Image (tube, grey):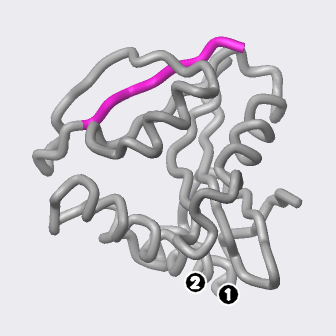
Amino acid sequence: MIEKIDHSEISNAEKIHAIFQVSYRIEAELLGVTDFPPLKRSIVDFLNSDTLFYVLWKEGILAAAVEIDLLENTLDICSLVVHPKYFRQGIAQKILLFLENYDDSATLIVETGWANAPAIALYKKFGFHETSQYINTGGIKKTCFSKTK
């Protein structure tokens, strides 16, 4: 079951931080980078975030987390991470289905590293269309996607 988590509680922020670390290390490897901004987020960053977090537990372990921001008529998927132990088990798909029905936002947006083939394939499978590419301040090439409900 996907549930909202209060990231302003230290124990929850620590859990979110931990899954972000293990998952984003894998993405950093896929992208061939060592200096990866998501890995620099601290527990305090999660405690103070203005975004919303939802999680999925499996076998008592935090299996996945998604960070979203609600913009004007748009749901921004800021981060979607799955613990490597649970890769390729359909968990990210469950979260995307949850987000498609989350609210009445007309559009969902997300971005990922251009070389993150598993994420790109997933977003395309769910009907997301590439809208742009850019190179961020850290020199990482990003691909942006959008989906109209």
Give the residue pinned by disc 2: 14
Identity of the residue furthest to the left in this view:
139
Classify 77 as above or below 133: below
Callout 1 amino acid: Ser
Q: Residue at x 11, y 46 (%)?
A: 139
- Quarter of the figure with residue 2: bottom right
23 relative position to 85: left or right: left
Classify 102 as above or below 139: above
Which quadrant holds the C terminus?
A: top right
* Numbered mark located on residue 11 in the image: 1
Identity of the residue furthest to the right in this view:
1
59 relative position to 81: left or right: right
Q: Residue at x 60, y 52 (%)?
A: 67
The count of marks equals 2
Residue nearest the viewer, comparing 6 with 23? 23
Q: CA distance from mark 2 to mark 1?
A: 5 Å
Residue 29 belongs to the span the image colors magenta: no
Callout 2 amino acid: Glu
Disc 1 on helix, strand or loop?
helix
Instruction: Give the class, few, some or many, for how many residues have Cα within 10 Å of label 1's Cα (few <14, many ≥20).
Output: few
Instruction: Give the class, few, some or many, for how many residues have Cα within 10 Å of label 2's Cα (few <14, many ≥20).
Output: some
Residue segment shown in magenta: 142-149
Q: Residue at x 16, y 35 (%)?
A: 135
Q: Residue at x 52, y 25 (%)?
A: 124
The answer to whether mark 2 and mark 1 are in CB contact below 8 A is yes
Classify 103 as above or below 45: above
Classify 105 as above or below 47: above
Residue nearest the viewer, comparing 9 with 20? 20
Residue 6 horizontal/vertical position (percent)? 75, 68
100 relative position to 118: left or right: right
- Quarter of the figure with residue 41: bottom left
